[in-house]
Image (cartoon, helix red, strand yellow):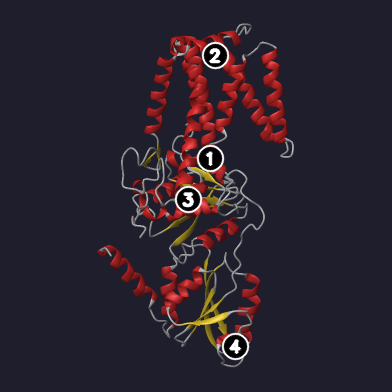
Amino acid sequence: MFPWQKQKTEAIEKRENRKISKNLKDNIAYLEEQYSYGLNYDFESKSVHGPTGKYHLLFYSTTVNTQQLSNHIVAPLLEVKKDIPINQILSVPSITPIKNMGEAEKGLNEGSVIIFKEGLAEGFEAKIQDFKHRAVEKAENEKTVKGPKESFTESLPTNVSMFRKKIPSKDLIVENINVGMRPAMPVTLIYERDLVNDEVLENIKQRIKNITVDNIRNVEILEQFIEERPSSLFPSMLYTERPDNASNFVSDGYIAIIMDNSSSCLIAPITIWSFFHSPEDRYLRWAFANFSRLIRAIAYFITLFVSASYVAVTNYHSQLMPIDLLLAIASSRERVPLPIAFEILLMEVAFELIREAGVRIPSPLGPTIGIVGALILGQAAVEANLVSPIVVIIVALSGLSSFAAANYSINHTLRISRFLFIAAASVYGLLSLLGAILLWVAYVVSISSFGVSYFSPATPSTKSTHDTFFRKILKNERWRPGFLNPKDWDKY
């Protein structure tokens, strides 16, 4: 065991073995400090003055059943006339005595109510948890075969409850910052105080506080106000609808941003690699996860460059193609009156129209309209000699590959970039295409997300788990992302 690991273990054991005091104020002050009372908006510390003495309740308002709290805990404490043990007074199904603060913290983290009485050197844990989660509904945009299926809802307490369920820790801070004036809406930051980089956290807070518009009602609008480059093609925050995915990020030192009326959350700061990783990568075995990443990487290259490369090679570098392929292309285009670049752009735009129509049409009809529309449109265009069959194949391959994008936001980036590369390739072929790629990469490298380089940890190189291109076997992933500069780098 390393020295810092030993110090960490000793500090935890010392804190957990702290005895409960007969002095009620000491117990309250300790737990309020540990759980950031006043900063943690859902952490409640309530006094109850009954006929037989003074009691104090500590709990998370988002994790307990408030009706049971009122009827089976508060009411009996106010009504009891005899000085009898608390576990005989309360009518909750499960109540157990606790002897030290470690047990009290464990109960609070699990969503229980902790009860202290003045003059009594022990506490009681009342288990009336009411964690909110979706039992049936699944994530629609980030589907996985393995792993949890639940997604965020439009209810802020429910979403906070799901975070609490997945990260049962007193170090998980849920902090509210009001934004807007008509009315002021709470923006909720979720982070682990013993991991988060304070400079990054303060940067995000300051950006939120600097917003002066009348109202911001969800995180989709908030994202456009606090990102560093609003006109950029590349998102600087990760948009996810999965609580398990967001919790994994928070556990690594990232910050989650949620609001009422949003069935998703934002993760910041972020790097470009996170947009190409799927939440399922953590649940699949090492070989399967990396194989999926390889397939997605190939799909990204296809959707970005296959159409542009076809335009460049057929227009300016026909000598690079085998003669049989060149003759086949020439034969298929014999009766097509349009230039190759315009032919490609026509089919790409048609594909985007079909995709957009499929999204807007009611879900039972969407896939059918998309498939039938693509088949009919492609075949009709070929028979009318507007496009060649090989162009239909290339555009279909490009469009199909774009669906492999693991994140909705980066999907738009890939689709728009594809048109830019096609336009560049139509000017001077591979020369202008290579120039466009260099400018594109240079621009991406220049982006930062709340002070973190967009290409980290590839450049600049930082100590991390190296979960960039391919991930390691999970038990070999030791370090948290170094580019975040977390307070605790070691996972072990």
Secondary element type, mark 2: helix
Visible residue check, residue 218 = yes
Kind of residue sitting beneath label 3: Arg
Secondary element type, mark 1: loop
Mark 1, residue position:
407
Q: Residue at x 37, y 42 (%)?
A: 452
Disc ID at residue 285: 3
> Rounded to the nearest whole Å, what is the CA distance between mark 1 and mark 2?
29 Å
Kind of residue sitting beneath label 1: Asn
Secondary element type, mark 3: loop
> Rounded to the nearest whole Å, what is the CA distance between mark 3 and mark 1?
21 Å
Q: Residue at x 46, y 67 (%)?
A: 37
Work out whether 320 lies above or below 35: above
Which residue is nearer to you in this view: 118 or 363?
363
Disc ID at residue 88: 4
Residue 115: image location, x then y, percent: 52, 79
Mark 2, residue position:
341
